[in-house]
Image: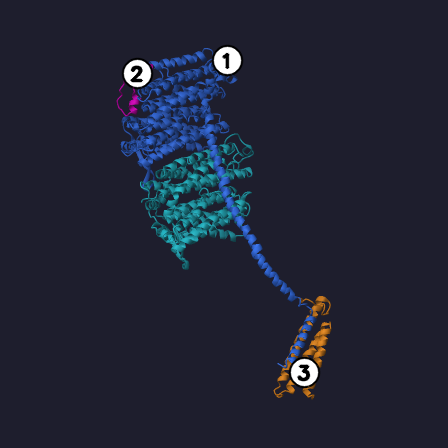
Chain colours: A blue, B orange, C cyan
Amino acid sequence: MSLPVQLLWLIPALPLLAAGLGALTPRSGRKLASGAAILAMAGSFLLSCGALMTALADPAAHLVHNFAWLDLGEGVLRLGWLLDPLTAFMCVMVTFVGLLIFIFSTGYLHEDPNFTRFFCFLSLFAAAMLGLLVANSLLLLFICWELVGLASYLLIGFWFHKPSAAAAAKKAFITTRIGDLGLLLGMLWLYDSTGSLLFYDGGQGVLEATALGGLVAQTTIGGLAVSTAIGLLIFCGAIGKSGQFPLHVWLPDAMEGPTPVSALIHAATMVAAGVFLIARVYPLMAVDQGLATTPLHALTVVATIGAITALMGAMIAVAQDDIKRVLAFSTVSQLGYMMLALGVGSWVAAIFHLLTHAFFKALLFLGSGSVIHAAHHEQDIRRLGGLRGPMRITFVTFALGMMALSGVPFLFSGFWSKEAILHAAQGWNVSHLPLYAGLAAVVLTAFYMTRLVAETFFGSARSDEARHAHENSPVMTVPLVILAVCAILLGFIGTPAFPWLQSRLMGQTEVHGHSLFEGGGLMVLSIVLVAIGIGSGWALYGRRPRTTTSALDPIEKISPGLFGALRARFGFDELYAATVGRLNTATAALADGLDRYVWDGAVRFLAALGEFAGFVNKEADEDVLNGGFDATNDKIRGTARLYSAAQTGGAHGYMRTVAIGFVLLVLIVMLGGGL
Amino acid sequence: MILTPLHLCLILSSALFCIGLIGALTRSNAILVLLGIELMLNAANINFIAFWRYGPNPEAGTGVLFVVFAIGVAAAEAAVGLALVIAIYRHQRSIRLQDARLLKG
Amino acid sequence: MTALLSLIVFTPWIGAAVLAALSSAKPGTVRAIALLFSLSTLGLGLFAVANFDPSRVGSQFVERHDWITALNVHYHLGLDGLSLILVLLTGIVTPVALLASWRVERDPRLFAALFLMLQGAALGVFLALDFFHWFVFWELSLVPAFFLIKLWGGPGATRAAYQFVIYTIGGSAFMLLAFAALYAATGTMDFIQLAQLGADGTLAQQLGAVGGWWPKAVFLGALLGLAVKVPLWPFHTWLPPTYAEAPTGASMFLTGVMSKMGVYGFLRILWPIFPTQLHGASGWLLWLALGGVVFGAFAAMRQTDLKRMVAYSSLNHLSYCLLALFAVSAATGQPGTTSVAAIAALSGTILQMFNHGLSAAALFYCVGLLEARSGGLRGLNDFGGVRTAAPIFAGLCGIALFSSLGLPGLNGFVGEFLIFRGVFGLAPWAAAVACLGLLATALFLLTFWQRVFHGPTGKVASSGFQDLSRHEILTLSPLIALMFVLGVWPQFLAGLINPLVTSWASRLVLP
């Protein structure tokens, strides 16, 4: 059964439908919500397998289906689906791992009152990730990318009544959004330069030769090729999402979410998105490799950031005491490996490691979830211990995951994918520093994983929670077993002798194997390093297990300063709080102060000016104009008063006047000699 | 100087007028003041008749007409005057003119 | 229908008159009548959509009658894509705002009548094509708004109402003077004729006869009136207290519809009539718009009063519209300017106007609900854990918040993306700076959600906090539904404005 590319949208649509259903289901509809989510995921898994068949039939082809989304007259925004081996492999991995995590969650969260909401968010998370995988447009990818961010926000803050969870959720969203703004700008630049956001579009897509040639031919600020600048901006998005230095701070805090969420974030959905993005736009990232004059190649930055992250994550993981935090920093470190692989030019090695890592990291997280669930939410490894007896299945599967992550030779998938990366780093002609960082991280990884297993499962139980722990129900252990099997077997699809996965990803139909031990010197070195790591870990933690919860860590005894710095995660959170956080608060205060004092002050000043003018006006009116007017009136009134005095009101007076007037008249007539 | 009948009439009317004027000015009873005014009016009427009878055209009858009108007007005036007096009395319980000062400006 | 537009404008006023006449009607009847009349706009607007020919560029359903012939004043109404979208927005926001004010107990008849007057005035502004009655509508909208704020507002309402009206009238006075000057120079106040004169430069010539500085002075007068209304940073200080003190329904209308009157004025009046002057000024206007984007968002972060916070977010969102317009204007005639970017920016502006109307109205309603349930509290720190007590409320409010911060899949993203896409093509540095606004917006909106809905159950949430009633869900659901629909299918609105925007871009951008 194969799935045509036109129907590729069904893969994300099924979980999206389940998410919609889950959103509308009342709290009591637990079976409905979880059942719909699991069924949708299973359906998507089958469809992904069908898509894989389609893709493998012609691995070199990029099957696309494009359609217009927003027609703006001259500029038509088009979206589309893309099917190639990269998409198909990722879809299969995400749906399969996701399915197992979903099943595990029904056991892990079966007491939670918001059970239905949890499956709604999980389905949304999966749908967004799958949409991101099948997108043939950077815009659609960005849309899904943000939705992944939203879903992670909702899930990290799922226990929202815990202030720490709410804060962690916000931190994750904001930190990744800082990177996303880079991605947004890169996308805008790309769109502005090429007029399209489709990856593949029959020669017109941005990842095809015409567009790439145009991008690399132009130069911008600092002599960078436009493609380099865009690539770096897009890489900002990946830095945020994939927890790379310096935006890795959200990832450990994301542990506040329920453990299946951590598994999903660290294995299948969230952090894989960044690596996938760079692998997807790899032609764009790599097109400046041919330029001799450019001051910087985009991939050099990727490799540098990857190497720093790989080493830093591994170092910090050594000194963490929270079982999930150790795993979180190991994810940071492993993602650094993947970025390193991308940077040194081997994106297939990165994807190979991404796939294998997804399985064993999901296994480790679900295993830790199993421990936490059994130990009544005790996550501190100093308070655990001795669990290998009561929790045998969890112990065995966890140990297998630990060996896969540490890179125990030959049998485990992690060994082969890590070898591929180290091999690629060795072949990088720019610098060998990433290789040395990777090798150092190999020792550290083996060391801290040994420490984790020794502290958790060996020795004696150091708290009541650990003493009362017992094995979980099959709904939780069966996914562990399946993932453990995959963690072993998956390595064999990409060994140097039979690099099936790599060749399919590269678009080849034939598999050209080399010797199984190609690059033997490096392989021997890394095996020795793994042995050193596990040996020293066991020597420090396994042989003389910790007996009390308050006992000092062996490294702390040796070098308290170093251990303190590592435990404090090199103080990145504090550094950001002191710089970015302060700057942010200061800007907000500035904006508010401008409003309150400057602009409002100006308005008040104008108002005061108006009032002053009114006052002057009033004074002028009353004293000058009205004063003169009043004075005139007073005079008139005085005269009137004078005359009105004659009006005595007495009739006699009036008659007297009449008589006197009459007499006067007569006298005038008589004396005047007759009229 | 020779006293013609016209002169006698005029002296009579002047005397009557002076009596009326003095009465109107000196009395404080409003009704007596009205009486005085009537006297003055009638003094004027006597003048009209006298000038008509001894004037150049005694046949025309104009003087009588004047007087008839003057008497009619005087009657109306007296009616109004009395009505005013009654109104003032109602208002002030007195018809002393010195008390009625409502017209004071 | 030859008088469709008059019908659209005056039906709400007829409703107000009917309410004024019904002196003894029961509150329930009054509310129903008011709702019915306010819904008429939506009905007639949809009728207009059905009969609207989107491929034609100019105004449709034109009504032009002689009015005051001595002054060359015509009664001139017309509808193009921009007006149509704003009529639809008014038709959606007003009934929702009335539904949101269902619980107004004090003189519901006067409240509803004032509201319908406000609605009619706003519609008149969106449809009038002659400055004479356009300005009458423009100023008439202030009167009911003033009384709505003063009589039904919060404790500081009187001061806010005076500030709002005086500030706005102060701006309008300059605009009136500017148009008096225009009339003196040209003898007409018809927008379309003035736009023609503006486009071919005759207007500047005629105004320039007075003095070389005169066209600029007239332009500044008109700019000032519109800048206060939108508001353009830093002419915005009336906005936070007004929105904060106004009753919830009035806040919804003020931010949802009235703030669009300013942006509409920029697009309909200022830009077409003064293209060269705007081009000359857009260099520093772009900075002011950026100031609104960045400082609006950062100032919002600092607010502890939720209504003030949402008010500042309005400033931030409307500044994106102006940013796009100024970027287009700044790039007019520049070599290398592509009309594709201008089309994206202008389409984004119009979509953003609509989208902001929806999301800001929804947010004000949510804050109003919080206020009503807590007995007048609306501080950022007065709540906590509300999601536990009211999950539906939290969910719907969350959707509105995420729509406001531009989450893809919801309506806010489409407009902002198009604006950023256009602005990046025209003035890349401005787009880069404006990204800071996006980040700060996310930060304060999530802080809002976190402090109010998350965390341990606070005092308010634990003392019998009710989840949304059916009436309240009904009020919010049209807005929420539209957020989803326009997020996934923005073509519905974009299709109405495409030819219009294309013609703007072709006329003004290409040298």
Residue C457 visible in image: yes
Magenta region? A496-523
Magenta residue check for A39: no
Question: Would residue C80 be visible to someone looking at this image?
Answer: no
The percent coordinates of residue A604 (x first, y second) are 52, 44
Residue corresponding to mark 2: A519
- The amino acid pointed to by label 3 is Ile
* Quarter-of-image position of residue C373: top right
Q: Are marks 3 and 1 in one subunit?
A: no
Quadrant of the image containing the C terminus of chain A: bottom right
**Residue at numbered disc 3:** B46
Disc 1 marks which residue?
A547
Q: Is A506 on the left or on the right of C399, as rendered? A: left
Is label 3 or label 1 in front? 3
Question: Vertically, is A265 above or below A72?
Answer: above
Please name the residue shown 69% across and 67% down the image.
B101
Q: Amino acid at mark 2?
A: Gly
- Name the element at disc 2: loop
Q: Chain of mark 1?
A: A
Badge 3 sits on which subunit? B
Secondary structure mainly formed by the magenta segment: loop
- The foreground one among C499 and C389 is C499
Both on one chain, marks 3 and 2? no
Q: Is residue B15 left or right of residue A202?
A: right
